[in-house]
Amino acid sequence: MSAPADSPPGGDPPPDADSQAPRPDSQGPRAANAISDEEVSALLEKSGAEAVKSFDFTAHRINRTQLPMLQTIGKSFAERASGTLSGLLGRPATLEFTSIDSMRPADVQASLPTPGSVAVARLKPLPGNAFIGIEPGLLLTLLDAFFGGSGRPGADPQAAVSAAAQRFQTLVLKSLAPDLAAAWTPVSALEWELVKLETNPRLLQLGGPQESVIVVRFTLEFGAATGPLDWLLPDGLLAPVREALASDGGGKPPARKQESWTPALSAALQEAEVEVRAVLAEASISLRELVSLAPGDIIPIEAPQEVRLLVGEVALRHGRFGVSQGRNALKILPGGPS
């Protein structure tokens, strides 16, 4: 007996359509959470190294609204220094304020060029040292122009730390010192003092590992040459004036209210003791008469009708001299001091 045409070999009946459809619960809850092949491909495409961006939380650009006065100082210095450098070099030079950044000391040192020369200076009366860095190639360009050249830097990188370059850098810094002091005047009167020029940036003491350095960046344009000039200001240096730097420049920071000690101070002043006196009479004599005075001599005076009550040299009231309860006394009269 032959098997039906639609039956598989072996005589088993063919499965129906419903039995071939997968059941939703045939693989359990893991099947419901599985992602599709398209989603896997999309994840793999975005997992390359170029899709990963690192962010250093210890080095960031300061919002200029955090230290608005420092930005004002930077712009004022740039405007003044442009004129000073142009006069020194005999050619137009433009210094522009760029930005204010906060960096770790180690990162600042790593960013400084080597060989290079960084000025170490005191900004009296602020504590510690400030630092001023200028790009070596830009320094050599200015040096060449100062001596009448075309303003092209030398090919030898060691030329930036040569004796001639350091003498010129000292001249530039001393020329800019009045501009720096004038720019800082709204915050504090500063006195510039150059301590030294450090040719090895790795030896700079910019602060501890947990501290930060405020970097005020400028861009100097001289002819076809452009390069950075930076102020490096450790946190410890700015600590005494940080509150003033955080002000909006409209004046001094508003005084803090002192309600806690004001009543106590007022009460203490009310109980303070002062010495009062009344001058009954005064007489004028010559120096000859003064040195010839002897016991028993009489100096004639005229008793005044009224005398003044004094605290120190300040007259408070006026009154009439008399006797009260057997003691000399002063009767206060109406009105102020006469």
Image (cartoon, rainbow, N blue to C red):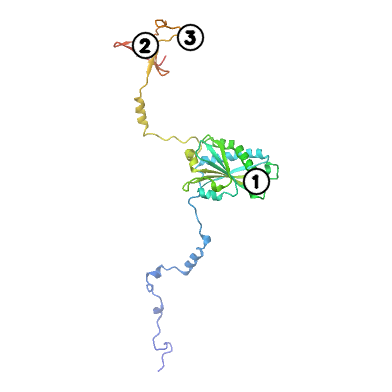
Residue indicated by mark 1: 140
Q: Secondary structure at mark 2?
A: strand
Which one is in front in this view, the residue at disc 2 or the one at disc 3? Answer: 3
Which one is in front in this view, the residue at disc 1 or the one at disc 3? Answer: 3
Q: Seen in the image, is 215 located left or right of residue 20?
A: right
Q: Secondary structure at mark 1?
A: helix
Whole-percent x and y of residue 37? 47, 69
Q: Is residue 205 above or below residue 263?
A: below
Disc nearer the start of the sequence (1/3) = 1
* Residue at image coords 37%, 69%: 29
Return the mark for residue 287: 3
Whole-percent x and y of residue 44? 49, 65
Label 1 with label 3: CB-CB less than 8 Å = no
Q: Is residue 36 above or below residue 335?
A: below
Q: Is residue 308 above or below residue 160?
A: above
Which one is in front in this view, the residue at disc 2 or the one at disc 1? Answer: 1
Q: Amino acid at mark 3?
A: Leu
Distance of label 1 from label 3 (alpha carbons): 75 Å
Q: Seen in the image, is 154 located left or right of residue 182?
A: right
Q: Nearer the viewer, residue 29 or 330?
A: 330
